[in-house]
Image (tube, coloured by chain):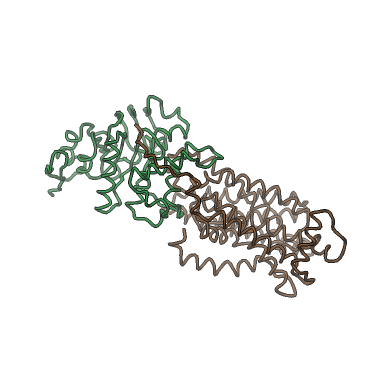
Chain colours: A brown, B green
Amino acid sequence: MRVAIDEVDRSPAKVRARSPAGLVLLAAIVVLAVLALVALGAGRYPIAPPDVAAIVWAHLTNSATEGTADAIVWQIRLPRVVVAMLVGAALASAGAAYQHLFRNPLVAPDTLGVSSGAALGAALGIVVGAGFLAIEAAAFVGGLLAVSVVMLIAARLRAHDPLVTLILTGIVVASLLGAAISLTKYLADPYNELPAITFWLMGSFASASSIEIVSLVPAVAASLVVLLLLAWRINLLALSEDEARALGVDTRRLRGVVIAVATLATAASVAVSGIIGWVGLVVPHMARLVVGPEFSRLLPAAALFGAAFMLVIDTLARTLAPIEVPPGILTAVVGTPVFIVLLARARRMF
Amino acid sequence: MLDVRDLAFGFGTRRVGSGITFSLARGETLAVLGGNGAGKTTLFRTLLGLLPPQAGAVSVGGIPLSELAPGERARRLAYVPQQHVPAFGFSVLEAVLMGRASLVGTFARPDHDDYRAAHGALATLRIDALAQRRVTEISGGERQLVMIARALAQQASVLVLDEPTTSLDFGNRARVLGEIDRLREGGMTILFSTHEPDQALAHADRALLLADGAMLALDRVDRALTAENIERLYRTPVRLVRIDTRRYACVPTA
C-alpha cells in the first residue's frame, strides 16, 4: 500500500531558486572570458585587453587585418589559451566524476594511477616514434589499464577500509608505472626522445597548436556531454553500492561508462600537455564549496573553475620568469597548501 | 505481497542460512530477530535482490524477483540501510529525491512529480524543516528519518528496514519507531530487523526468529517472542514484563 503523499506543491523552480548555482555559473563564464582576454594580451609583447577584444572580434566577423599583434593573439597565444582551458576543464570534470564514483573527495586522476598510466602510454608512443593521434590513443589505453588494475587489486584485497585501500593501491600502482616511465626514459635515445619525454612529462602548453585543439575538442566534448547527460544519475554513485542498487541503479554499467569517459578526458589532456597534477583534486573541491555536491550543478562549475584555474596557471607560467615555468610545478605550489587547508577543514567540507 | 519459499542464502558457496519460508501480507509488519551474525542483513540483501539466492525463490506481488529488472525491483521494494554514511554534503531534499531514481529516466532529472513526492515524504515524516540542511550536518536520528523519507519517495509496496534504530540514542529511537508506527497505521507493508525483543513486540504484527541460519519461530509477535524463545535465540535468561496491552519490557535475568 502506498503511503498517502501530502499534497505539498512546491515546484522544482521554486526550490532551485534558493540555490545561486545559475548565478555562480554565469559569473564564472564572465570571469573566464575576462581572464582569456588578459591571457591573450599578456606576454613579452603585451597587448591591452581592449585591443585583444578588437582582434578577436575582427576574426569572428571575418574582417581581420594582418599585423604583428593579430598574429601573436590569433596564431600564437589563442591556441595555447584554448588548450589550457580545455585541459583545465577536462581534468577538473574528470576529477569531480572520479570523486563521486569512488565516494571519496580525495581521489583524483593522479591518485588512481590514470595520469601515470596515460603518461607511460604516451612515453612509449614517443619512443616508438608514433604520430600524435597514436600517442593520444596510447595514453588513453594506458590510463584505462592503470585505473582498471587499481580497481581490480583494491576489490580483491577486500580490506576493512576499501577507500583507503583504493587510494593506497593507486599510489603503489602509480609508483610502479613511474618506474616503467623511468625505464622508458633510460632506454630512449638521449638526444631526441629523452628530452622530448622529459619536457613533456613536466607538463607544458608551449607546443599548443591547432592540431592539438582538434584532437582535444572531440575527446573533451564527448566526455563532458556524457557526464552532463548522466549528471543526476551520477549522484547515486555517491551512495553505498547496496543503496544505489536498491534504488534501481545498474551501478556496474553506470560506473563503467563514467570511468571510461572520465579516463578519456584525462588521457586526452595528458597526451596534449603532459602530467599536470592537482587540478583534478583541488578544483572539484572548490566547486563543491561554492555550488554543493549535486553533480548536475557541480560538473559545469568544476569545468569552468578548472578552465579558469589552468588559464591563470599557464599565463603565470609564461610571464613570471624570463624562461617558462612548467605549469605542473605551479599547480603543485598552489595545490599543496590549498589541499592541506581542505584537509584541515575536512569535516565541514564534504 | 512478499513471498519467500525455501530460501537459502549466503555469499558464493558459503551458506549463511536456509529453509526460510514466509509470506508478508499487504499492510502487515514483520520483525526479524536473531543474534549477531545470524544472517539478518544477508537475508535482507537476498530479499532485495542485492545478493542472488543460493536456493529457493523470492517473489513480490506474485512476480519472481529474478524476473525483475533493477528499476522494477526498486518500484516494489524500498530499502533503508542500517547506517547511511554520506560521502558528500547533499541537501536532505537532494538525498530524498534520490529515492526517485527508478522513476527518473537515465538521462533525465527529477521533474515536478518527483519533487512533490520528495516533499510529500518529508512531510509524512514531519521533517520538512530539514529539506535544505545538509545530510552531513544533521543528527543520526534525523538522518535515519531522511533515509526512511527516501524510501517513501520511492513509493514501493514494501519497506525493508535493516536495524533502523541500532545506532540511535534513546530519544531518536523512540522518534523513529513512532514514525514507523504511523506508517503502519497508514497501511504500509513493512519488514524490519531488530536486536530488541520488546521493540518487535510493540511495533510488529509477526516475528521471524533466526537462529544458526534457520527459522526458530515465525508467528504473531506475542506467540513467537516468548521468554523461552528469546532465551534460545540469545542464549541468555530473560524475563518479560508486561507494561500494557502491546508493550513489554524484556529484561535479562542473568
Which one is nearer the viewer's eye here, A119 or A53? A53
Q: Which residue is drawn at 12% across and 42% down?
A: B242
Question: Where's residue A209, x and y in %?
Answer: 78, 57
Question: Where's residue B185, x and y in %?
Answer: 26, 36
Q: In which quarter of the image is residue A67?
A: bottom right
Quadrant occupied by the N terminus of chain B: top left
Which one is nearer the viewer's eye here, B225 or B51? B225
Question: Where's residue B94, x and y in %?
Answer: 45, 48
Residue B64 shown left or right of residue B236 in the figure: right
Q: Residue at x 29, y 52 (%)?
A: B168
Q: Quadrant of residue A334?
A: bottom right
Please say whether residue B9 is visible from this viewpoint.
yes
Please say whether residue A305 is visible from this viewpoint.
no
Q: Quadrant of residue B100?
A: top left
Which one is nearer the viewer's eye here, B203 or B100? B100
Q: Residue at x 51, y 47 (%)?
A: A13
As drawn, A81 above or below B104: below
